[in-house]
Amino acid sequence: MTKSEIVKQIKAKKSFLCIGLDTDIQKIPSFLLKEKDPVFEFNKIIIDHTHEYCVAYKPNIAFYEALGANGWESLQKTLDYIPENIFTIADAKRGDIGNTSTLYARAFFENMDFDSVTVAPYMGEDSVSPFLKFKNKWVILLALTSNKGSEDFQYIQLQELDREKLYERVLTKSQQWGNDNNMMYVVGATQAAELANVRKLAPKHFLLVPGVGAQGGSLEEVSKYGMNSDCGLLVNSSRGIIYSSSEKDFGEAAARSAQELQESMKKYLDLYAK
C-alpha cells in the first residue's frame, strides 16, 4: 500500500485508528473456545464490527507464534479476512543480520503479504535494508517506545557536547536508508513530551503510536504534537477495543470503543492536520 493510499483512507474515514489484534486465547470470550479456530473467530467478529472506524490492523505476532502451527494458520486467515483497503502491520519486531532479515522480509511480505513489519534498528543498516527492497511495503522502525525500560538506552546521550540522544540518532541515521514512502517510526504515546522533537527530526514520516488508552497516552497530545499535513499518524489501540466486553456482545462493544476513538480523531484532524 502506498503512502497516498493510506492518506486517502484517513481522509475518507476521518480516522487514523490502528487496531491491535493482540488476541490472547486465555482472554477471549469462553463461548468461542468451542470453535475449531477460536482465535480467528474472535478476530473475524472484531474486524466485522470495527473495520469502518479504522485504517489499519496490527496483529502482534507473538500471540500467534505462541500457539505454534495453529497460531500461524489463524494469523494467515485473519490477514486474508482484513479488507484490502486497510493497512496491515505485522508487529514482529524483527532485526537480525542481512541474510536472516531477508528471510524475515520474505516471510511477512511474500509469503503472508503484510503491508508492513516492525523492525528493531539496533544491529544497523544491513539488518534493516533487506526489508526496504520490497515495492509498496513498509518498515516501521522502533524509535522511541512506550515501555518504562525505554529509559535504559533510548535516552542515552551519545556525546557530552552535542547531547544527541540515541533515539534521535536512530531517527536521523535511518533516513539515509529509507524515506517517508517506505519507512515509518514507532513512537509511544506515553512519550508525548518528545513528539514535537520527533516530528522536527522526521517531519514527513508516518508515526505508529501505541500506548493510547490502556497504557495512559493522551490522544489529544499525540495529535497536537505529532500530526502533520497528511495526518502522519497511525494511533494504535489494542486492549481498549478488542477486550471491551467478555460477553457475547464483544463485537458490538468493540465497535462502540472504536467509534468513540474515531470521533475524537475526526475532531483532532480538523484541528491539527493543516
Image (cartoon, rainbow, N blue to C red):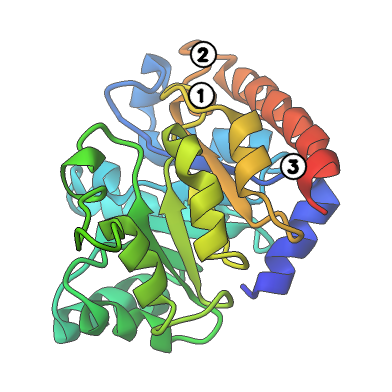
Q: CA distance from mark 2 to mark 1?
A: 15 Å
Q: Residue at 65%, 63% (x, y): give it.
A: 84
Q: Residue extending furthest front?
A: 161
Q: Residue at 60%, 48% (x, y): give it.
A: 226
Mark 3 secondary-structure assignment: loop
Say which of 142 and 53 sits in front.
142
From this viewpoint, is residue 116 visible?
yes
Q: Quadrant of residue 145?
A: top left
In the image, which is nearer the foreground, mark 2 or mark 1?
1
Q: Residue at 59%, 14% (x, y): give it.
A: 249
In the image, which is nearer the foreground, mark 3 or mark 1?
1
Task: Tell me how many marks there are.
Answer: 3
Amino acid type assigned to the residue bearing label 2 in the image = Ser
Compared with 86, 223 (above or below) is: above
Mark 2 secondary-structure assignment: loop
Amino acid type assigned to the residue bearing label 1 in the image = Gly
| Badge 2 density bin: few <14, some 14–19, many ≥20, Cα 10 Å | some
Q: Position of residue 17 (x, y in %)?
A: 63, 42
Q: CA distance from mark 3 to mark 2?
A: 19 Å
Q: Position of residue 14 (x, y in %)?
A: 81, 44
Q: Which mark is residue 213?
A: 1
Q: Which mark is residue 52?
A: 3
Compared with 101, 196 (above or below) is: above
Q: Are marks 2 and 1 in contact (CB under 8 Å)?
A: no
Query: In the rendered image, which residue does mark 2 sit on?
Result: 245
Q: Earlier in the sequence, mark 3 or mark 1?
A: 3
Q: CA distance from mark 3 to mark 1?
A: 20 Å
Say which of 129 and 24 sits in front.
129
